[in-house]
Image (cartoon, grey):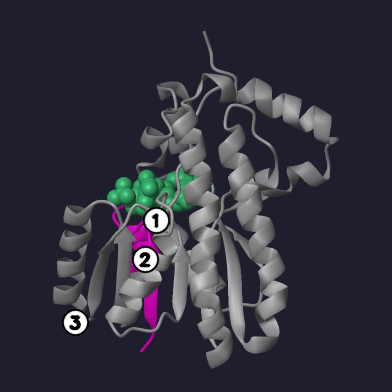
Amino acid sequence: MATSLITGASSGIGAAFAQAMAVRGDSLVLVARSQDKLETLAQQLRQQHGVRVEVIVQDLTQDDAATAIAHAVRTLNMTVDVLVNNAGFGDYGAFCDGDRTKQLDMIRLNILALTDLTYQFLPGMIERQSGHIINVASIAAFQPIPYLAVYAATKSFVLSFSEALWVEVEPFGVKVLALCPGPTVTNFQAVAEFPDSMGDQATQLAMSAKTVVAEAMEAMNSSVPNFVNGGPVNQFLANVSRFIPRAALVKSIGQQFRPKG
Ligand SMILES: NC(=O)c1ccc[n+]([C@@H]2O[C@H](COP(=O)([O-])OP(=O)(O)OC[C@H]3O[C@@H](n4cnc5c(N)ncnc54)[C@H](OP(=O)(O)O)[C@@H]3O)[C@@H](O)[C@H]2O)c1
């Protein structure tokens, strides 16, 4: 049976990954900051599915968080076959009005932790000639988004990095997938402090985390470098940048996202 390590497993898409991977019998390592939520989920999954579930409480914005996790996994005598780099957050508003620490933590979490965790676990997968890495990007990865400037840029990194690795490691039997959900019903919108009007709009289009993950579980076994969740609206949003001049596109997105009032 495979062992899957999921970051951001305490809620939303990460918790849905934990559920889906427990259903198929994986041993699990759940990572996030909220110990109570992780322990509750772990206990539920052990009882319902009879799988091994370990919890690592870790703030992934901390220096050497990935090294600490790799060390904890070795101590547990586990080998990671599937790494789901899911933990992430956004922050809505004009870049200069945003909190400096929050913007930098976003880069530390969405980019640095994801990159370092990949660096920790990918060599073992290459050596064993098998493994999966799912990096959770977003449809925000496909174009700049004014008023979500840092967030969209971090997700562009995730998409670009994952697609490049997809080519590098394919000969070794390892698969890398950039998962690109559109709006999904989770705590994301609240954490990003979207205004109610924008949150409501996103909620109307939103998928459930369970459906996002069900689609991801199918996509991870195909040989594609990225997967855009959902139907035609998300596909359109992910592809529109190929057909509209970049300046016009970014201006139009800026109008849509500019804080009202
Ligand atoms: N929801 C959407 O509309 C949407 C769309 C596209 C992409 N995504 C992406 O999907 C991923 C999952 O987000 P979600 O929608 O499921 O949101 P969520 O419900 O807010 O979950 C975020 C997860 O990340 C963890 N996390 C946050 N900061 C952390 C830190 N410093 N260290 C360790 N863990 C941390 C949180 O756990 P703790 O607070 O317990 O640490 C939580 O488990 C993110 O990468 C997000 O960018 C979401």
Tell me which corner region of the image, top left, top right, bottom left or bottom right, holds residue 69. bottom left
Q: Which residues are magenta?
A: 1-19
Where disc 2 sits, the SS reads helix
Instruction: Identify residue type, mark 3.
Output: Gly
Residue sticking out furthest to the top: 261
Q: Identify residue type, mark 2.
A: Ala
**Residue 103 appears at what percent x and percent y?**
51, 35
The residue drawn where x is 22% and y is 59% is 38
- Residue at the limit of the structure toward the front, as seen here: 63
Q: Residue at x 52, y 24 (%)?
A: 93
The residue that label 3 is drawn on is 50
To which residue does mark 1 refer?
13
Indicate the secondary structure of the residue bearing disc 1. helix
Mark 1 burial class by Cα count in 10 Å: few <14, some 14-19, many 20+: many
Camera-side residue of 150 and 47: 150
Residue 159 at x, y = what percent?
A: 64, 56
Residue corresponding to mark 2: 68
Residue 12 lies left or right of residue 259; in this view the side is left
Between discs 1 and 3, the one toward the N terminus: 1
Whether residue 191 is visible here, answered yes or no, is: yes
Mark 1 touches mark 3? (CB < 8 Å): no
Name the element at disc 3. loop
Q: Position of residue 148 (x, y in %)?
A: 57, 32
Instruction: Specify the quadrant of the image occupied by residue 188.
Output: top left
Give the residue type that dot 1 points to.
Answer: Ile
Examine the rendered structure and indicate whether residue 224 appears above or below residue 34: below
Q: If you read the primary sequence from the N terminus, does the residue marked by circle 2 or circle 1 appear first?
A: 1
Q: Are marks 3 and 2 in contact (CB under 8 Å)?
A: no
Q: Is residue 189 left or right of residue 26?
A: right
- Location of residue 193 with respect to 64 vertically, above or below: above
